[in-house]
Image (spheres, helix red, strand yellow):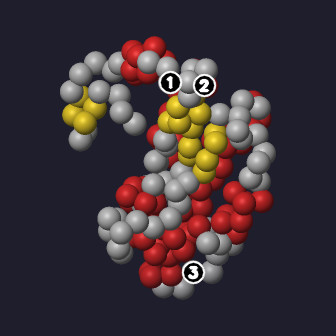
Amino acid sequence: MYRGIYNGKKRHVEDIDQVIQRAKSTGVTGLIITGGTLKESEEALQLAQKYDGAYCTVGCHPTRVGEFEIMREKPTMEAVDNNPDEEVGNEKEKREQLRENNARKYLEGLKTIVQKDLKNETGKIVAIGECGRNKATDVSAQPQHGGRIRGDDAEEPIENRGRGGA
């Protein structure tokens, strides 16, 4: 999310309040703040709640599917090894189990953000997505990301559309 930072370097003091005020002074009556990662989605909701006429999206933009890769690297293999409920045979299966667990954690994080908006009945989240593919994204990461959203979690946004959003 743009806050005076470009390519990871601070370029100027954050001026989001002034940017929004200038937009309103020119006649802009509404804006949608895009959340392209888990962190950005949380920040987008916070900003949308701060300003009248501001709404947001939550999701994982196709150019940011590396977020799923990052999530899967955080836990250790020990976490999988110490799970007595899972019979995981070899290293490849263990790694796939780890990937699936962490992809689910990422999606749960997005779900938590949506539930927060629903609970507060603010209606600030107006779209969920993207959770798809993009030709500009590393091709090897796309099927992993796309496959994870086609399971049980893929139906939830469809089942819950129209609840609490604008």
Mark whose residue sits in front, 3 or 2: 2
Q: Residue at x 55, y 54 (%)?
A: 129
Three-letter amino acid code at the position of disc 1: Val
Residue 88, disc:
3
Give residue 28's mark: 1
User: Is the residue marked by circle 3 packed among few (<14), some (14-19), or many (20+) residues within 10 Å?
Assistant: some
Number of other residues with Cα within 10 Å of mark 2, as a class: few under 14, some 14 to 19, many 20 or more? some
* Residue 53: numbered disc: 2
The residue mark sitting in front, 1 or 3, is 1
Q: Quadrant of residue 46?
A: top right
Per the image, label 3 sits on a secondary structure element best described as loop
Instruction: Give the quarter of the figure containing the N terminus.
Output: top left
Circles 1 and 2: CB distance less than 8 Å? Answer: yes
Other-residue count near label 1 (Cα within 10 Å), few / some / many at <14 / 14–19 / ≥20? few
* Whole-percent x, y for residue 2 in the image: 36, 33
Question: Does the image show residue 111?
Answer: yes
Q: Secondary structure at mark 2?
A: loop
Q: For the point 45% across and 55% down, which residue is it?
A: 61
* CA distance for labels 3 and 2: 50 Å
